[in-house]
């Protein structure tokens, strides 16, 4: 029977096995709490050690107790000075009325306290994206960036003790013992036949002595020898690193207020976390545009106050230019997410955007999502121009009017095809 010993280091005062069992019990409550995280004022928790509130009923454990209406009980209370066995204890006067000084709640609703579960980054991403996938995900490999992984490559006779393969070594030992003892057995058998056939006393004595010597040598065959030891052998195998680049295109014109930009920021953060879970290497390219389009850093992308009119086509041309110069289609998985309120200066600009997507952008990307953010809920020029591309397999578009719609829209864009949305 094999014994598996888990030697992973536990955090101080914690058990990995117990934690895994606990998370298994409360995973339904954790999944229900995910939309609330997206709706929080701050999304800093979504990048790492997140806190998820779980109803306390999720941590109750079953227990055993005696049936109070059956069985015999003998109880000894400490400090008893006046009661004997069989006496009935009177109920204290005034029992049932509290003497506390606090003020109770007048609400008839029964509530439960919350229990806070601390999730690691890996656990957080697992619950967030376990039933989502990237549409049309085709792995491409970088020719210049190569990683190495350890791969089993049979056995070797020399290595470190921790890599000793006991089963294979034992098999080698058995084979050696059987072969060596077989040689002795054949010689002993032959000598015994000669012993039975000879009648000379001196020859018999010599044969018996030789048989005794061979039997003694047969018993000295060691159970394990250095030649039996086999060690697991590993070799470093080059492995291309799967990579992805995500273009984040955000409209920062005067019509995009704080509400619209906040929704766009939350959606882009979710998309980045999702890509980082799918790929080992993810690069981000941030493009802001009003009347002009420019590539910026993350800080400026989310926090710059620069604004102006709305011209969208230059941002798509800039994306195409950057992708052509820095990200080869054969080596990179290219994704794009565009967020805008859909308002442009002229319908001609919207038509140009539709033509750029159809002829230049969509043929080169794995997937593109267009998010139109509006408080009014009215469809803009861009929405009508992009509607004609809905039949494209690698293009999706959705409306978001409120923060509470971010998670449902994200799930709709990236849900697995074999799952039915509940």
Image (tube, rainbow, N blue to C red):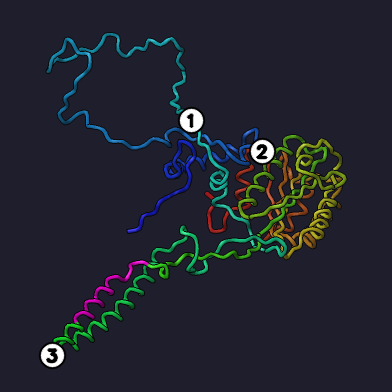
Residue bearing mark 3: 199
408 vs 55, nearest the viewer: 55
What element does badge 3 sit on? loop
Q: Is residue 189 above or below residue 343?
A: below
Q: Position of residue 143 (x, y in %)?
A: 71, 65
Query: Is disc 3 in contact with disc 1, using a CB cutoff of under 8 Å?
Result: no
- Residue, x 68% and y 53% (percent of image)? 282
Q: Which mark sits nearer the N-terminus, 2 or 3?
A: 3
Q: Residues within 10 Å of mark 3 (few under 14, many from 20)?
A: few
What element does badge 2 sit on? loop
Q: Residues within 10 Å of mark 1 (few under 14, many from 20)?
A: few
- Residue, x 53% and y 54% (percent of image)? 420
Residue bearing mark 1: 114
- Quadrant of the rendered image containing residue 74: top left
Please name which of the two marks, 2 or 3, marks the residue nearer to the observer.
3
- Please provide the residue range marked out in magenta: 208-224
Specify the label residue 38 is tagged with: none
Q: Which mark sits nearer the N-terminus, 2 or 1?
A: 1
- Residue, x 62% and y 61% (percent of image)? 148
- Quadrant of the rendered image containing residue 406: top right
Residue bearing mark 2: 402
Query: Is disc 2 in contact with disc 3, using a CB cutoff of under 8 Å?
Result: no
Residue 179 belongs to the span the image colors magenta: no
Mark 2 to mark 1 CA distance (whole Å): 26 Å
């Amino acid at each position: 029977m094999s014994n598996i010993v888990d030697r992973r280091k536990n955090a101080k005062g914690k058990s990995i096995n117990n934690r895994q069992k606990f998370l298994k019990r409360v995973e339904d409550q954790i999944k229900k709490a995910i939309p609330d995280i997206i709706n929080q004022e701050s999304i800093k928790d979504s990048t790492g050690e997140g806190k998820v509130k779980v109803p306390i009923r999720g941590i109750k454990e079953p227990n055993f107790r005696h049936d109070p209406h059956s069985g015999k009980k003998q109880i000894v209370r400490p400090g008893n000075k006046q009661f004997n066995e069989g006496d009935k204890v009177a109920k204290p006067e005034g029992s049932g009325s509290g003497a506390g000084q606090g003020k109770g709640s007048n609400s008839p609703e029964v509530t439960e306290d919350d229990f806070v579960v601390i999730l690691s980054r890996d656990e957080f991403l697992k619950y967030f994206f376990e039933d989502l996938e990237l549409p049309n995900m085709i792995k491409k490999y970088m020719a210049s960036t190569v990683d190495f992984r350890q791969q089993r490559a049979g056995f070797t006779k020399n290595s470190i003790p921790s890599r000793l393969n006991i089963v294979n070594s034992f098999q080698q030992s058995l084979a050696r013992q059987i072969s060596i003892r077989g040689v002795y057995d054949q010689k002993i058998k032959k000598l015994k036949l000669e012993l039975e056939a000879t009648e000379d006393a001196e020859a018999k004595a010599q044969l018996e002595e030789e048989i005794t010597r061979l039997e003694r040598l047969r018993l000295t065959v060691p159970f394990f020898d250095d030649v039996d030891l086999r060690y697991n052998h590993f070799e470093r195998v080059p492995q291309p690193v799967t990579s992805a680049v995500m273009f984040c295109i955000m409209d920062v014109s005067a019509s995009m207020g704080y509400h619209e930009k906040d929704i766009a920021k939350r959606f882009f953060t979710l998309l980045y976390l999702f890509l980082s879970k799918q790929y080992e290497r993810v690069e981000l390219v941030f493009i802001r545009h009003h009347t002009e389009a420019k590539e910026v850093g993350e800080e400026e992308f989310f926090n710059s106050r620069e604004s102006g009119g709305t011209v969208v086509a230059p941002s798509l041309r800039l994306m195409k230019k950057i992708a052509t110069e820095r990200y080869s289609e054969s080596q990179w998985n290219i994704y794009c997410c565009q967020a805008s309120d859909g308002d442009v200066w002229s319908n001609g600009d919207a038509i140009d955007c539709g033509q750029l997507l159809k002829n230049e952008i969509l043929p080169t990307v794995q997937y593109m999502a267009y998010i139109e953010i509006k408080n009014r809920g009215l469809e803009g020029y861009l929405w009508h121009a992009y509607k004609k591309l809905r039949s494209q397999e690698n293009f999706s578009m959705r409306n978001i009017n409120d923060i509470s719609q971010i998670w449902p829209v994200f799930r709709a864009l990236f849900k697995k095809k074999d799952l039915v949305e509940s």
